[in-house]
Amino acid sequence: MKNAFLHEPATKKALAEFILHTDKLSLGPECFAFERQFATYQQSHEAVLFNSGGSANLALIQSLKNLDLLKDGSKIGFSALTWSTNVMPSVKTLNVMSDNLLERLESEPLDALFLTNALGFTGDLAHIRTICREHDVILIEDNCESLGTELLEGKAGNFGLAATFSFFVAHHMSTIEGGMVTTNNQELAEMLRIVRANGWDRNLDTSQQTMIRSKFGVENEFDAKYTFYDLGYNIRPTEITGFLGQYQLQFLEENIAIREKNYLYLEQEIKENPELVTPEHDHLTRLSNFAIPILCKTPALREKYVTRFSSAGIEVRPVIAGNIQRQPFYPKYVRTVFDLPGTEFIHTCGFYCGNYPELSADDLKIIRSCIKK
């Protein structure tokens, strides 16, 4: 990324004015306003803001446990091509597809499925949602890299019980650090707000506070100050996060449109190169691309193209964490290892480079020249 924000000079000027004139920087009205605006954008009933996308993932899993929707020993499936904080994809889409899920369910009954919508792409989410309902599997989405991607059946992030989003630098919109959980389930949203703030009720509305205090016999405001109703953390955002979220939200549609245009321009060259595999996205009506995946047909070809990109001064990275089963932390906590040829192919043959609105025509030409056979 060249900048932390889209329209960075104007954003920094507005942020400086906000800091100079605001009376409060801890969680408050700016955060709550951003939650309402983001929920409207995502077409979700509830949105709960956190200090990072990783915290949003943590709070979501903890909330599901607090509500007894998940328990110790519950089996949670997740995309093998994923971020470390999420812990079955196919090569063609970079994502879990419904047939991958059905295959896994034959041998491993699941209580929940945590999908990663990678790099702006998704699997066939409507079919996955149907399978999850039929098998009583809780579906949640990590939509941190696919904000704005749409399918015929709706926006990515709206297919399960809840979804998480990230506003870290280089994502579709930046609050420097920040994350969000969206859901249509009011009980879950209430628990998310409890988990976000140490386990107490300070960020619940008056009616919710009255109900939970009555349930646990908390008789007055004095005792309520330090009553902890369930397991929680201090993962609250600041008013700076809330302000930046509102300010950057006005540029989100512009950001997505440019990212999609950039990707489709570069994809033309990918399709012409027989040494590369083109990810399929025909099931998407809008591709809110996060980064440009380069899938080479062999590890040797990956070495060739990584060297080419690097020599041109273009930063490249592995495709997220690759096969998550290969990560050093994984065998410490998970005993079962699956044969995942699609994920392994992406791990050994794939990499990506950034896609963002500040890429100039010359930048795109350089990237395209690196893709050419």
Image: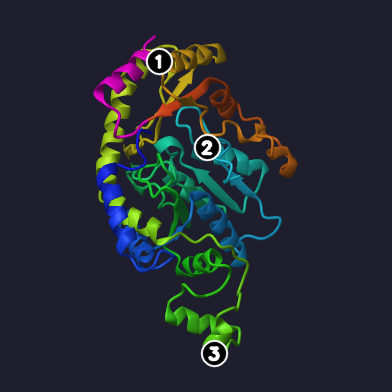
Q: Can residue 111 be seen by looking at this rendering?
A: yes
Residue found at the very far bottom of the displayed protein? 219
Residue under label 3, please give it: 220
Residue under label 2, please give it: 99
- Looking at the image, is mark 3 or mark 2 nearer the viewer? 3
User: Looking at the image, is mark 2 or mark 1 earlier in the sequence?
Assistant: 2
Q: Which residues are magenta?
A: 355-373
Q: Which mark is residue 265?
A: none
Does 101 appear above or below 226? above
Quadrant showing the N terminus: top left
**Element class at badge 1:** loop
Q: Position of residue 180 (x, y in %)?
A: 44, 55
Q: Position of residue 340 (x, y in %)?
A: 62, 30
Would you call the spot at circle 2 few (<14 residues within 10 Å), some (14-19), or many (20 or more)? some
Q: Position of residue 333 (x, y in %)?
A: 72, 44
Q: Residue at x 39, y 36 (%)?
A: 290
Residue under label 1, please give it: 312
Say which of 343 and 24 sits in front. 24
Q: Can residue 43 be seen by looking at this rendering?
A: no
Color style of the picture: rainbow
User: Looking at the image, is mark 1 or mark 3 earlier in the sequence?
Assistant: 3
Tag 3: residue type?
Asn
Tag 2: residue type?
Asp
Say which of 284 and 128 sits in front. 284
- Corner quadrant of residue 270: top left
Does 329 appear above or below 305? below
**Element class at badge 3:** loop
In the rendered structure, the answer to whether residue 305 lies left or right of residue 217 reads left
